[in-house]
Amino acid sequence: MSKTNDTNYQTVISVGIDIGTTTTQIVVSRITIRNTAPGSSVPRMEITDKEVVHRSKIYFTPLRDHQIIDADAVAQIVLREYREAGLTPEQVDTGAVIVTGETAKKENAKNIVESMAGLAGDFVVATAGVNLESVLAGKGSGAAAHSREKHSVTLNIDIGGGTSNIGVFKNGQVIETACLNIGGHLIEVERQGDRITYISEPARAILRECGLSWQTGDMPGLDELKSVARLMAKCIIETITTENVSSITGELLMTPPLRLDYRVDSIMFSGGVADFIYGDFRPVSVSQVSEYGDIGPLLGWAVKEELSAAGIVPEKPGETIRATVIGAGAHSVDISGSTITVDKAVLPIRNVTVVSPFVKGVPESPGEITTAVHRAAQRIISDGSAQFVAFAMAGPAEVSFAAVQELAQGIAQGAADFISRDKPLIVVVEKDCAKILGQCLKIILGDKGEVVCIDQIVVGEGDYIDIGKPIMGGRVVPVVVKTLVFENTGARKD
């Protein structure tokens, strides 16, 4: 895997690693970065080509027991796939290590991501909270791109081993997320056998609702297993069709219910269970259902049945089981505009999670701005998945002093619960107005917190950014945009 490096063109190698409830996967991508600025203009580095060059085998996530991830075994998987890809750790420039689903709850999950990051490169390291995982899966499946191409609303449900992560995308941007504690690996069964080997706490709530009191070692019949899978499926379908959910669905929701105050044009499913939704699987025996040591195939069948009963015909995405891992990994480098406001003492800042509060553009009133900013921050910080948050937006429709003041007032109020002396207010604006916006924010905040406001940078929900120390006499700052690779085959030009 060669790397070309000159002043206007460079290719870098990115690795995405997803350590999930049931499976662990690695994807290697080649990213092409070019200087797209004309002549002697300030360099503007952008990703122009993205190509997935290696997809790993799909491994069962190695666990020492149900509470401890086997870190050594995971590291060996990564190194084995590096060799298969003809790659050495030193050749890796960037990437993402994501621990998802039930695995993110394991006792040593934080140590896992840190040890994986130590293998190579400048990794984004994150134990994905449920909201972030919904965004990653939706981008990785192709649902976000579908909504952008069709100018529509696309809802993606990623059903894995431990959770069902829901992302709603409108014109390419996420507008809502939710997560249910429902997955195919919450009840484990002997592979190709009929004896239960593990029951998770969320699964016990489902069993209670079904009037069942199974214990480890029990041997349930196929009809009983079907009743459990059907209830799981009903909870999933209920979550995407009504905001007035049942008590059991409410108990299993790890987030607030979807608002659903919009028309959904397309529904897609990804994750390990999705292939059984789109396939022709029919359960005939417990030993057949338990091929993978869980009830995932049966859950997929049940979701397909419930969709049919509800009159819903799902569209198949470009990626199913690999959606999350393909949703993690690439980066580009940008230079900010030359009219910025930064408190130099807080820089550099690394691994800042980006949220996009305004899907339809900046609202007209500060109150609406406040609500949108607060809601966007809560999507990320409510589950503890982000330390730093950047609010990304195009900017006011008209860059007037009055409009910028109103925007600043709304942002400051909406982000008030999140700002502190060690958590600056970070705003990324596409339009050339960061200097005046940042100055307004500094006046409003006073000594409550620091401000970093930069412009002429285009980022999206779910991206990560690093903001470096000011350069060129303090006029600009370098920004590393760790965006997401989400195509499914070959190279694509944006």
Image (cartoon, grey):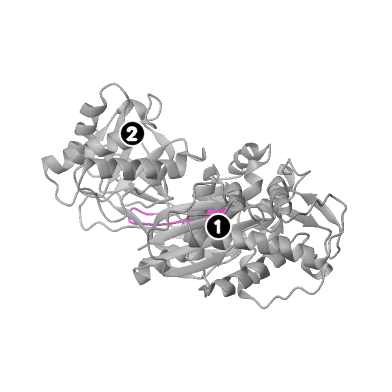
Instruction: Kindly identify which numbered label has been placed on residue 93.
Output: none
- Amino acid type at circle 2 is Leu
For the N terminus, the quadrant is bottom right
Which residue position is annotated with label 2?
425
Question: Is 14 contained in the magenta span?
Answer: yes
* Residue 266, horizontal then vertical, whole percent: 45, 70
Q: Secondary structure at mark 1?
A: helix
Q: Nearer the viewer, residue 309 or 253?
A: 309
* Residue 170, horizontal then vertical, whole percent: 37, 61
Instruction: Kindly identify which numbered label has been placed on residue 324.
Output: 1
* Residue 419, horizontal then vertical, whole percent: 37, 30
* Residue 67, horizontal then vertical, whole percent: 73, 41
Left or right of 40? Residue 219 is right
Q: Nearer the viewer, residue 51 or 110?
A: 110
Q: Which residues make up the magenta segment? A: 6-16
Q: Nearer the viewer, residue 348 or 22?
A: 22
Whether the residues at callouts 1 and 2 have beta carbons within 8 Å, the answer is no
* Label 2 neighbour load within 10 Å: few <14, some 14-19, many 20+: many
Q: CA distance from mark 1 to mark 2?
A: 29 Å
Q: Is residue 274 visible?
A: yes
